[in-house]
Image: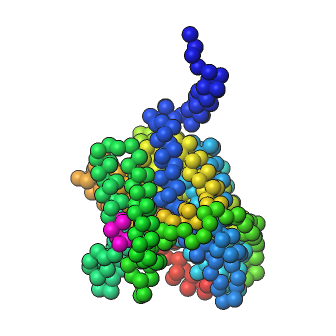
Amino acid sequence: MNTQTPASQKAAARGSALDAFFHVSERGSTFAREVRGGVVTFFTMAYILVLNPLILSTPYDGIPPLGTTEQIAAGTALIAGIMTILMGVVANYPMALAAGLGINAMVAYTLVGTSGMTYADAMGLIVIEGVIILILVLTGFREAVFKAVPTHIKTAISVGIGLFIALIGLVDAKVVRRATGTPLELGLGGSLQGWPVLVFLFGLFLMLILHVRKVKGSILIGIIASTVLAALIEFVAHLGPFDPESNPTGWSLSVPALSGPPVEIPSLATLGHFNLLGSLDKIGIVSVVLLIFSLLLADFFDTMGTMVAIGAEGDLLDEAGNPPKIREILVVDSLAAIAGGAGGVSSNTSYVESAAGVGEGARTGLASVVTGVLFLLSMFLAPVVSMVPYEAATPALVIVGFLMMTQVTDIDWKSPDIALPAFITIIMMPFSYSITNGIGAGFIAYLVIQLARGRAKEVHPLIWGASLLFIIYFTLAPIKAILGVA
């Protein structure tokens, strides 16, 4: 006898349809894990809603930005939300996208102002780069390059990213800082100081304890508990924002307190503010080509590394180290670059912080849909989202860095041919603060070792081509000087 009501039968049918569409059960996940993973990914990358507006709202030499801080924040959330949902629905991959750090800084501090270039001109370059990279995907070239990468290099990329995001977490929380005598030092003057660092340590050890006790939602619980603790400390102590001179023990990124009403109506004034060919008249074709090349190479390989790291963490890769639906993943990522430029908020790209959601249990695109919806909601709830300081969110990056680091045992460290390029790939990511640099250094090291071994014919032609492009990429400054371009 069927005891289900019509409403419960419809709910079960919807759940079954979602399960079939996203392959939730097939990938060993549950709806609860996907939702938790999506929420965790959002909170570990929500900082972009604060940082991107701060970077792109900077006027340069009389050249105005495309909008106010609030307008750029709204555009950032909108494009990130749409593209992340698209990643979930089209590619069924637990990877979120948003405006890429590094590229937005290049826009604000390098492109804008060069020979009178405006923000709209710079966004036009990003649209062109996105179109080119989309063509490379549709022709199969980008996928072919990815599949040509040796398996041990793919593993090294994942391990290197683990170290990289752990370092990002420690630096953003000011647990390690730049020093005068050394590149980095512990805390402030070699000592941990201030309430914000205590919040970070509270979140880190809470997540560690919950993780080893196998508590579901350990990362999300840690972020929420740390944010609540941070808000209580700020309410009592009024620490204020971090300033290296006047307030070195203040909160990083955001002060955990509401400064106004929790809901606000967004303005999308930045959308459509790009000038596709405006840069040609101002800096010339040679400079345009070199700038697009720089943007292209960073986008091309950053996503490759992120895709591998997330797939390895979620056990989603096949025996050759390839994730499912590579073509779809890369198409959405390419469209995100175009959308970011056309939306006036800089190129959108895949975020390695998505690994935090995978560490929470996410295995499908349903988690990306959850993250995307939260980005869209954040357009209206920006004051609440901005309450989460770095110190509350970044412990998750350290935990996930550990989880990704465990794959290091899959590399044959007794074979120099395998171990040396893998080692260089791993160390160059955190040491140069760049996924792209790590991949490029690893490619070149792999090629050099194969040549030294007399195995040039065993190197895939695409690895030859990629290595040569990286050599150009690493020496762009002297090349520009020789060519006499800016």
Residue 181: image location, x then y, percent: 29, 86
Horizontal and vertical percent position of residue 385 = 55, 62
Can residue 369 be seen here? The reply is yes
Look at the image and tell me in which quarter the N terminus lies: top right
Residue 249: name its quadrant. Answer: bottom left
Q: Is residue 32 above or below residue 391?
A: above
Residue at 60%, 56% in the rendered image: 375
Out of 272 and 224, give the one closest to the viewer. 224
Left or right: 292 in relation to 319: right
**Percent x, y for residue 369?**
59, 47
Name which quarter of the figure residue 434 lies in. Answer: bottom left
Overall secondary structure of the magenta section? helix
**Which quadrant, please, contains the C terminus?**
bottom right
Is 368 part of what is drawn in magenta? no
Outermost residue, left direction?
A: 414
Q: Which residues are magenta?
A: 195-200
Q: For this rendering, which residue is in front, 4 or 85? A: 4
Q: Is residue 198 magenta?
A: yes
Residue ID at (58%, 14%): 2
Residue 285's quadrant in the figure? bottom right
Q: Count up the numbered dots.
A: 0
Q: Is residue 417 visible?
A: no
* Residue 55 coordinates in the image, percent (x, y): 58, 76
- Residue plotted at (69% across, 89% down): 62
Q: Residue at x 32, y 49 (%)?
A: 210
Whether residue 273 is situated above or below residue 85 in the rendered picture: below
